[in-house]
Image (cartoon, rainbow, N blue to C red):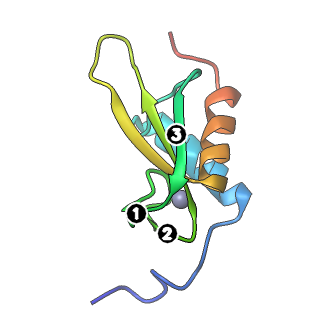
Amino acid sequence: MEPPGSRSHGPLNPQQLLELALRRLREGTLSREHQPRLFAGHGRQDCCSLCSEAIGPEDIEYEVETTDDGTAAQQLRFHRPCYYAWLQACGSEPDPR
Ligand SMILES: [Zn+2]
C-alpha cells in the first residue's frame, strides 16, 4: 500500500530539493556540515537522507560522514542532485553558532 504518486514522481527538481534541504536544516533533521567526509559509490537501495527515495544501483550514492561537535558521527546518504542541494543549503544560511 503506497500513497499515489509516491514512487513515480521521479527526482524533484533542483529548486524543490534546495527548499527541502533548507527546511530540513532549519528543523534540525539534517545536520549542517561544511567539510564533510564524502564517499561515492553505487546505491544499495538505501533511502536518501534528503528526498527519502531509495538510491538504486543505477544511481550514484553520495555517502557523507558528519562530525558534529562532540556528538556521534552521523551517516547521511544522498543522490547526486540531493547532495548538491544539501551543500548549497548548508552554505546559504548563516551558521547559528
Ligand atoms: Zn535524494
Q: Amino acid at mark 1?
A: Arg
In the rendered view of the protein, which quadrant contains the N terminus? bottom left
Q: Position of residue 30 (x, y in %)?
A: 43, 38
Residue at far front of view:
41
Which residue was labeled with disc 2?
57
Where 10 sits versus 65, above or below?
A: below
Q: Amino acid at mark 2?
A: Pro
Which residue was labeled with disc 1?
44
Disc 2 residue crowd, few under 14, some 14–19, many 20+, Cα 10 Å = few
Q: Is residue 84 left or right of residue 95?
A: right
Q: Visible in this render: residue 29? A: no
Question: Do the CB atoms of the residues marked 3 and 2 lie less than 8 Å apart?
Answer: no
Q: Earlier in the sequence, mark 3 or mark 2?
A: 3
Give how far apart the Cα atoms at labels 1 and 2 are: 6 Å
Q: Earlier in the sequence, mark 3 or mark 1?
A: 3
Q: Is residue 51 left or right of residue 92?
A: left
Which residue was labeled with disc 3?
39
Which residue is found at the position 58% from the left and 41% from the top? 22
Give how far apart the Cα atoms at labels 3 and 1 are: 13 Å
In this view, the residue in front, 6 or 57, is 57
Q: Position of residue 89 (x, y in %)?
A: 64, 37
User: What is the secondary structure assignment of the residue under circle 1?
Assistant: loop
Question: Do the CB atoms of the residues marked 1 and 2 lie less than 8 Å apart?
Answer: yes
Disc 3 residue crowd, few under 14, some 14–19, many 20+, Cα 10 Å = few
Which residue is found at the position 52% from the left and 39% from the top? 39
Which residue is found at the position 69% from the left and 37% from the top? 88
Disc 1 residue crowd, few under 14, some 14–19, many 20+, Cα 10 Å = some
Where 45 sits versus 69, above or below?
A: below
Q: Amino acid at mark 3?
A: Phe
Q: Position of residue 69 (x, y in %)?
A: 37, 12
